[in-house]
Amino acid sequence: MTVRVTAGTGGSGCTSFRREKFAPMGGPDGGDGGKGGDVRIRGDANLSTLLDFTYRDAWEAERGEHGMGSNKTGRSGEDVVLPVPPGTVIRDKETGERVGEILEHGDELVVAKGGRGGKGNAFFVTATHQAPREWQPGEEGEVRTLELELKLIADVGLVGQPNAGKSTLLSVISAARPKIADYPFTTLKPNLGVVQLSDSRTFVVADIPGIIEGAHEGKGLGLQFLRHIERTRILAFLIPIDAMDWQAEYDQLRREVEQYSPELAAKPHCVVFSKCDLMGELYVPAIEAPGAFGMWAISAPGRLGLDELKAAWWSKLLELRKSGAA
């Protein structure tokens, strides 16, 4: 999402001389101009998308007022605040520089600074220059074109090829209702679901659009998929039990993630064999999955193996939190 932000210009200083009935030589009293308003980005937990920015892509803060006589400083311009959901990364579109990111509700970042107000002639008074007529114009506010990118913050990210059963699993273990169909790329955007265990224990699971070979180069949904799982704490690789080659499918998923980001590939992961209802039993194939903290077999439609899987995810998340890794 691209937006153009313009901070307010500072007000100009004033040239004025005090004129009162009993003070004919009152001297300079021109006040300074007010500061221009800043443009700020603030985290708002009530938002979940950047959709509002598709309807308005230009934002401008108020300029500062000019200084006045009697040493009156002009009023500063009002700031403009752009609300975004937590997990938003801000970059400068022209330079590619990372400006910052919003992680929590209430986090705030100044992305365009308002111009400083100009000095009035009272500022230039010296012992040898007692009637200055100098004044300064206000400085221009910053103008920037920014790219806003929302990255999901989830505890568990479901990773798999199209039609691996990710959406079905999410719909069964949470109240989320993602689109489910029997054709590839049913999921075109990430879906979040909150999984509730006993004793008010909850965690968030993200159903990520399907990954195919070459996704790290942008093929399929490509980078749209991969950048959304950077913030997940655990990756769960879903492999349907009716896949032609379980090992090859696992290796390909791992390879695409690693080629996109070695840091992402280093996150804790597990292997989940889905659609086991096709075999009539929960069968865990023997594949090589170095580094995986476990392998499970499930049937989402049959509600089989789900309690064990959710308990394992919770235990791993708890371990990460205690170690400070999440």
Image: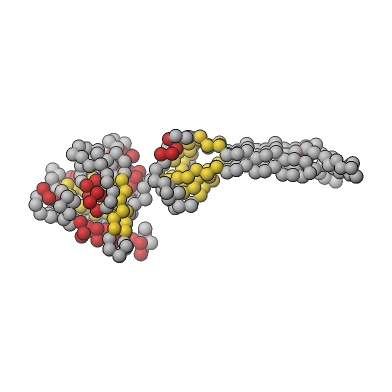
Left or right relative to 287: residue 8 = right
Q: Is residue 212 visible?
A: no
Left or right relative to 225: residue 139 = right
- Residue 192: image location, x then y, percent: 32, 48
Left or right relative to 131: residue 296 = left
Outermost residue toward the left in this view = 280
Which color scheme did the rendering employ for the protein? secondary structure
Relative depth, front residue between 69 and 292: 69
Relative vertical location of residue 7 with respect to residue 171 in this rendering, above or below? above
- Residue drawn at x 70%, y 38% is 66
Q: Is residue 141 visible?
A: yes
Q: Quadrant of the N terminus?
A: top left
- Residue drawn at x 65%, y 40% is 64
- Residue 163: image location, x then y, percent: 20, 42
Q: Quadrant of the C terminus?
A: bottom left
Relative depth, front residue between 206 and 267: 206
- Residue drawn at x 30%, y 51% is 193
Relative vertical location of residue 294 with respect to residue 217 in this rendering, above or below? below
Number of disc labels: 0
Relative depth, front residue between 232 and 252: 232
- Residue 144: image location, x then y, percent: 53, 37
